[in-house]
Image: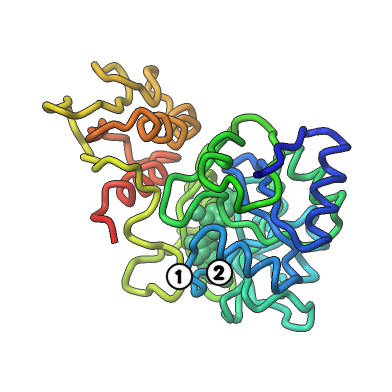
Amino acid sequence: TTEVLNADPKGFRRAAEIWREGGLVALPTETVYGLGADARNDLAVARIFEAKGRPKFNPLIVHVADVAQAQALVEWNDLADRLASAFWPGPLTLVLPLKPEFGLSPLVTADLPTLAVRMPAHPVARDILQAFGGPIAAPSANPSGKISPTTADHVVAGLNGKIEAVVDGGACEVGLESTIVGLSDQPMLLRPGGLPHEALEAALGEALAIHTAADPLVAPGQMTSHYAPGAPVRLNASQKEQGEVMLGFGAVACDLNLSEAGDLREAAANLFHHLHRLDAAQAKAIAVSPIPNQGLGVAINDRLKRAAAPRG
Ligand code: TXA
Ligand code: MG
């Protein structure tokens, strides 16, 4: 069974020790829980794919404790500098040309010439990464295609027995995965996430090109069906129909509300949490209120669209 570690120095030392031995430890970040392994260790990284049932062509994000660690891994540039100084540590992942001489496991990048790096802001993540002192590859700590975890309980419910440990750092504050920006070429939004693209554009001083499904190789993990609860999902519902439970937003009649006040931050933090609750309650069908498509609403709608997509 999977060990649940406390978020204290003893827990951090144990997590780092398991990583050094090639094991898997899930850790809290401000976005979602990540399933971490030493990014230099082929066997450890292979076990991430195995534990999640993740296709090998889908590359991983590497987590670092500081900017210098990121610069050792990728070819840094001015735009990276600008975005990292504005938003790191935080819910932003940068995709840059990989420095092959660093010696990351090729499984991390799925043999792409680029690497996704991120410096998380969660104090527990920062402490553990510092205790370890090396790059940690970490996808979200859920079985592939399922709802992302925002508590240690979600991690255990999905991966118990398949990973050595999870560090319990409480509920994730942002609740949506990081925003991914490609900077190896023209800057491009590869995945909407916990940092609204409006904030990115303000920092860049220009509009950000948005990745579309027409170029699937750019963001290989953007599967159509993802974040899927057990039940089918119906979007933009004004009210529930027979047999449905209603996941609301704003002042609407519903069974569970993402944010009664209509606050997108609160809705983002509640999204995966509520979907996990509906799964645990074995909901038969889920109807969801419309969500405004601006700020964090863009990422919420992206996740909901995938949750509602026909399952593969
Ligand atoms: O907030 C997050 O980003 C969380 C926490 C744990 O950091 N991690 C996360 O990882 O969401 P994951 O594996 O669930 O999603 C990573 C996404 C995938 O869609 C993957 O295809 C994409 O990042 N990705 C990774 N490396 C890439 C690369 N070199 N080029 C383009 N996309 C890449
Ligand atoms: Mg994921």
In-front residue for pair 55/266: 55
Task: State if disc 2 and disc 1 touch (CB < 8 Å).
Answer: yes
Between discs 1 and 2, the one toward the N terminus: 2
Residue 180, visible in the rendered structure:
no
In-front residue for pair 39/298: 39
Q: Position of residue 71 (x, y in %)?
A: 78, 68
Residue that badge 2 annotates: 59
Q: Residue at x 29, y 16 (%)?
A: 251
Work out how far the residue at label 1 is from the one at label 2, CA to CA, in angstroms. 7 Å
Q: Residue at x 43, y 76 (%)?
A: 217
Q: Amino acid at mark 1?
A: Pro
Report the disc number at residue 220.
Answer: 1
Does residue 215 appear to the left or right of 38 in the view shown? left
The residue carrying mark 2 has its beta carbon less than 8 Å from ligand 1: yes
Q: Outermost residue toward the left?
A: 242
Q: Amino acid at mark 2?
A: Pro
Residue 16, visible in the rendered structure:
yes
The residue carrying mark 1 has its beta carbon less than 8 Å from ligand 1: yes
In which image quadrant can residue 249 be found?
A: top left
Q: Quadrant of the N terminus?
A: top right
Q: Residues within 10 Å of mark 2 (few under 14, many from 20)?
A: many
